[in-house]
Amino acid sequence: MKKVRFKSLLSMALILMIVFSFPSGVFAETVAEEPATAEESEIIEAAEEETEDYLLTEEPEGEEVVPEEQTEEMILEEEAEESAATEDQEAGAEAEETVASVLPDAEQIPDGLDLDEAAILPEEAETEAAVKPGEMLPEAVKPTDGSAYAVLDDNYDLIFFRSFNTYTNGTETTAMDIYGNTYEGKVYDVSDFEYQTDGVLNSSPRCPARDVVRRIRVADNQKIVIGLTNGTNGGWGFHGGSLSFTFSDCPELVSFNGKGFVVDNVVQMNGMFYNCQKLKELDLSTWNGANVKAIGGIHAGMFQKCKSLETIDLSLFKNAKLEIIDYLFASCFKLKKINLGNLDISGCTQMEYMFAWCESLEELDVSRLNTANIKSMQATFGGCTSLQTLDLRNFSTKYLENMAYMFEDCKSLKKVDLSSFLTGSVITMNNLFKGCDSLREVVFGSHWLDWKSDACLPSGKWANLEKKVYKTEKELYNDYASNASSWAGTWTRLFDDVAMPSVFYFDPVYWALKSGITTGISGSNKFAPYDNCTRGQVVTFLYRAAGSPAVNTSNAPKFKDVKENDYFYKAVIWAAKNGITSGYTDKNGKPTGKFGPNDPCTRGQVVTFLYRAAGSPSVSASGAPIFSDVKKTDYFYNAVIWAAKKGITSGYSGTNKFGPNDKCTRGQVVTFLYRNR
């Protein structure tokens, strides 16, 4: 806004005399045909608010003015100036209203009017060429013409656009793209994003207004080109442009839409969104990252510390030859899904901390990654507390040296396949499996040529069940290398209470473990084979044995004692919808609305569940074992006969009894399932 002052109140009076010397009809005509312009309004406001002795500097509307530290003399002087200004304003109050209504444009002021030319501040002259609020972009501007700017509007949207005009950095501006879309707010010169000329790239562009911006996009049909066109050395030994840390440390950034950014020449994206902790919406689908080489580095992962991102699609790098990927997703706490595309990492030597602390990641497909030149996998998956399985059998590890902390604190990890790992060059396995308390199966190959005793494989007995080899973890460390050719295969961590191969439930328990039917007692290394099996556990075993099919809970039978957050909820609904159970009935056969999930399951109930799960086939008692405690009138009669004829049960050894009302143990249940597989 222009700032104008009058030399004295006499000047104001002179204006009034001149104004009223014009014929009234002239002014009436002028007012009707030419309303006051924005510039006139600005001059009027300045005249109303400013005096000869003190020019009040205006601050942007809505912003608080924080005074600089002042001395006592400065304060006294300012108070005197304010007093004088107040007196002058009160003295001319009667004339101000008339002046505000008729004051013409500055260029139309008649000769002789004593207007102080010095009232236009020096900085006004320096910004005279700047685009004024409301000015439109020329119609001829094309999406790739002009210089790059960005506007931060009142909603904290940062919109990149292009123009031939010159905008004053940081001022309030109204800008418009070629389709007439208007953007109002503070303008920022982002020409650093436009590496179109020859020269060495010394630093990356940084996002303006990084502390407050919430959403970032490019204006409609505009293009913001990033990257040198001549292949000049851009730092880090790469050629081309850089987006390293460009949008990093934006604490309020929620949404980033990459449409309109042209990144064809960019080679560095390491740290690009580093520490954008609120970023949830990320669209890079229009980007071509074919020339990118670096998307990671030490504390420089492209998405490192994006704690709110749930999905990431890296298909933009499908044609890229990547060289640096470490820390890529480190500390993406909510990340649940990653589309790695066809990442070519054959030129990478490190995968350090690549997925570290991705706490919500339950599945990860890394089968297409080419690790032929990888030397370090330090903490690659460390802290992935939700991962349950990892298939690394396609990993080539000829040059691998560092496996320290690789799976540390993967608390839910149950199985990992390392069958292709060559460990002859490995120097350290420090804390390789530390904190992997749920680990049950590890697949080792014949190229596992060396163990390090600090690998922290969960202690206890391990067995190659197929080859009937049983070893402690320490014996594996010491003996595996010399027996790798004959011991290669799946090694199972035995339960502390199911470690004797001679017990009847040994094979059924580890079949159930391998099949995903049971994981043992939570928080322990036990299966508890002699504990009573509850009805909730039995239907859960059945449900998992059936492959854990999808369950439509709509219109499902409801039980008062079965809640949605119960581990057995889906299993009970599945069993009820498939006619396996209908819950309890009273003595009159009327449903009680309860399932009794925590009640011990009887042997008669278990075989009945199995029989109904098989479709309740017709049964002939001919040739079936006769149990003295099973009558034709019993609800479980057909089920017991069916189970006996199928070899699922032979009753209690040395008796002619089945014990249908006896409580069924966990060992017995998995044995029934094993025999019915």
Image (cartoon, grey):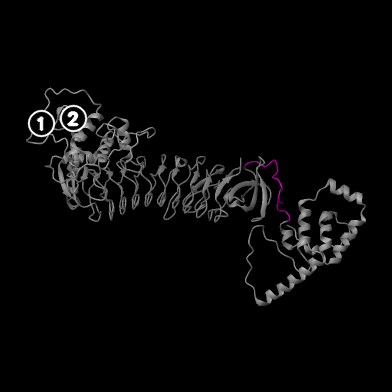
Q: Secondary structure at mark 2?
A: loop
Q: Give x and y (percent) for residue 196.
A: 59, 47
Q: Is residue 199 left or right of residue 431?
A: right
> Residue 669, position in %: x, y?
20, 38
Question: Could you tell me which secondary element the residue under label 1 belongs to?
Answer: loop
Residue plotted at (70% across, 45% down): 136
Toward the viewer: 306 or 29?
Answer: 29
- The magenta span reads 128-143
Task: Name the residue type under label 2.
Answer: Asp
Crowd rating for badge 1 (residues with CA inside 10 Å; few <14, some 14–19, many 20+): few
Residue 517 in view, yes or no: no
Amino acid on which disc 1 is placed: Ser
Asked whether, in this view, residue 453 is left or right of residue 220, the answer is left
Q: Residue at x 76, y 58 (%)?
A: 45
Up the image or down, 353 lies above or below 529; here it is: below
**Residue 628 tag number:** 1
Circle 2 Cα neighbour tier, 10 Å, few/some/many (<14 / 14–19 / ≥20): few
- Total numbered labels placed on residues in the image: 2
Q: Nearer the viewer, residue 350 or 627?
A: 627
Q: Which mark is residue 634?
A: 2
